[in-house]
Amino acid sequence: MTRLTAYRVETERLVIRCWDPRDAPLLDAAISSSLNHLKPWMAWAHEEPKSLEDRIDLLRSFRGKFDLGQDYVFGILNGNESEVVGGTGFHTRQGKHILEIGYWIRADLVRKGFATESTAALVRIAFEIAKVPRVEIRCDPKNEPSAAIPRKLGFVNEGILRGSGEFLGQPRDTEVWSLIADEYSSSPSSQSTLKAFDAVGQLLLE
């Protein structure tokens, strides 16, 4: 399985980093203010609201899986880390050498380019640090704002897997986008400006 060493990524406007239990109140504010925005697309939003204690436990589990190389969930925060902008991460569920990027942005900060900025940074991390041969983005075909991100970043639309997913117990179509290593250097993501750091703060990439 691909192991990721980047724990913190700084872009022009954002800090994208491994969650810390101390982020629980900021995450709670972002999710609580965005439930109507998130519920059509994110099954986990239907498990809200959560208590602060449950939120802390969730962030601990994210960090544990991150450290063990099982799954890599990041918070997206503003530059001074005073507000959660959204969430993103690399999922390992598609195969040993494939990283799938997922993302969400809080309702009051959509259409500001934050999803594009954070995803472009993660694409660089995937190809230049994790050295994977393939990155995927999967979304509901009806979720056009989500599909716009891979389209902007040069991903190839591989089509729709009909009824391949499940949402709240019902089958759902899945649109698959991909970028492979040979295409990366000519993609917009390769020009993303960032600094990436490991778990102890050592610079990995800029």
Image (spheres, rainbow, N blue to C red):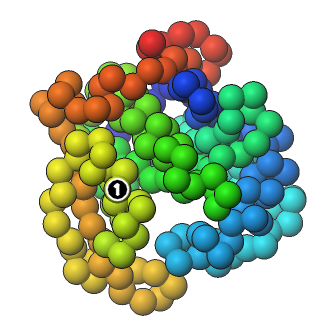
Q: Is 186 positioned to the left or the right of 53 in the image?
A: left
The answer to whether one can see residue 71 in this image is: no
Secondary structure of residue under mark 1: helix
Residue 10: x and y in percent read: 57, 24
Q: Is 71 positioned to the left or the right of 173 in the image?
A: right
Q: Which residue is mark 1?
A: 148
Q: Quadrant of residue 107?
A: bottom right
Q: Residue furthest bottom?
A: 170
Residue 112: x and y in percent read: 54, 47
> Which amino acid type is shown beneath numbered disc 1?
Ala
Does 91 sit above or below residue 19? below
Does 185 sit above or below residue 60? above
Does 149 sit above or below residue 190? below
Q: Quadrant of residue 22?
A: top right
Q: Relative to the observer, which residue lies in front, 75 or 111?
A: 111
Q: Quadrant of residue 50?
A: bottom right
Q: Residue furthest top?
A: 202
Residue at the spot 33% in from the left edge and 23% down from the top edge: 191
Q: Is 132 positioned to the left or the right of 186 in the image?
A: right
Does 46 sit above or below residue 121? below
Q: Quadrant of the C terminus?
A: top left
Q: Relative to the observer, which residue lies in front, 92 or 194?
A: 194
The answer to whether one can see residue 87 in this image is: yes
Residue at the spot 30% in from the left edge and 46% down from the top edge: 152
Residue 125: x and y in percent read: 40, 28
